[in-house]
Amino acid sequence: MISITEQYYSSDNNERVKSIKVKIGKLQNVLPDSLEFCFNALIQNSKMENAKMMIEHVPIKLECKNCGNISEQDGYLFACPKCGCSAITVISGNELTVSEIEFENVSNNKEVLN
C-alpha cells in the first residue's frame, strides 16, 4: 500500500498524504487491527506520517454457473443458495487494493481504483 501511494506523489517534496482508502475482500482474511498497526508503524518519518487509513470491507459475492444467481455469502460455503450447485464464480471478496489517496493539497487527490 505504501509503495502504491508513493507512485502518486508529485515532485513537491512538501506534499503529504492525508488519508488512503483501501478495499479489503473477506476472502483475504486480513485482520483490520493488524493491518492498521503495521501501516502506522511503517509510515513513521515519511510523507505519510500523519495519514489515516480507511478500510472498506468487500463482501463475498458469488455467481452460480448453473442458474446465474448472484448472491452474497457470509461464510465460506461456496454453493448457490438458490439451486444448491457448487459450480460458482467468485465475483467479489478477493480484493486488496488502494482505492483512493487524499493529499493535504486537495488539487493532487487521486482516485486510484473504483
Image (cartoon, helix red, strand yellow):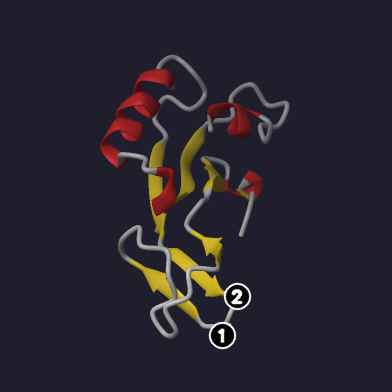
Q: Residue at x 66, y 32 (%)?
A: 9
**Residue 55 vs residue 16, the one in the foreground:** 55
Residue 35 rendering spot, x and y as whole percentages: 35, 33
Residue at which label 2 appears:
65
Q: Residue at x 59, y 30 (%)?
A: 15
Under tag 2, what secondary structure?
loop
The residue carrying pointer 1 sits among few (fewer than 14), some (14 to 19) or many (20 or more) residues within 10 Å by Cα, namely some
Q: Residue at x 58, y 82 (%)?
A: 68
Q: Which mark is residue 11?
A: none
Q: Residue at x 55, y 73 (%)?
A: 63
Under tag 1, what secondary structure?
loop
- Looking at the image, which residue sits at the far top? 45
Which residue type does callout 1 highlight? Cys
Looking at the image, residue 60 lies above or below residue 95: below
Residue 99 rendering spot, x and y as whole percentages: 56, 50
Picture quadrant where residue 34 is located: top left
Looking at the image, residue 55 lies above or below residue 37: below
**Residue 2 vs residue 29, the one in the foreground:** 29
**Residue 39 vs residue 107, the one in the foreground:** 39
Q: Which mark is residue 67?
A: 1
Which residue type does callout 2 highlight? Lys
Q: Quadrant of the C terminus?
A: bottom right
Q: How far apart are the two marked residues, 1 and 2, measured between alpha carbons?
A: 6 Å
Looking at the image, residue 97 lies above or below residue 92: above
Residue 103 rendering spot, x and y as whole percentages: 55, 41
Badge 1 vs badge 2, beta-carbon distance below 8 Å: no
The residue carrying pointer 2 sits among few (fewer than 14), some (14 to 19) or many (20 or more) residues within 10 Å by Cα, namely some
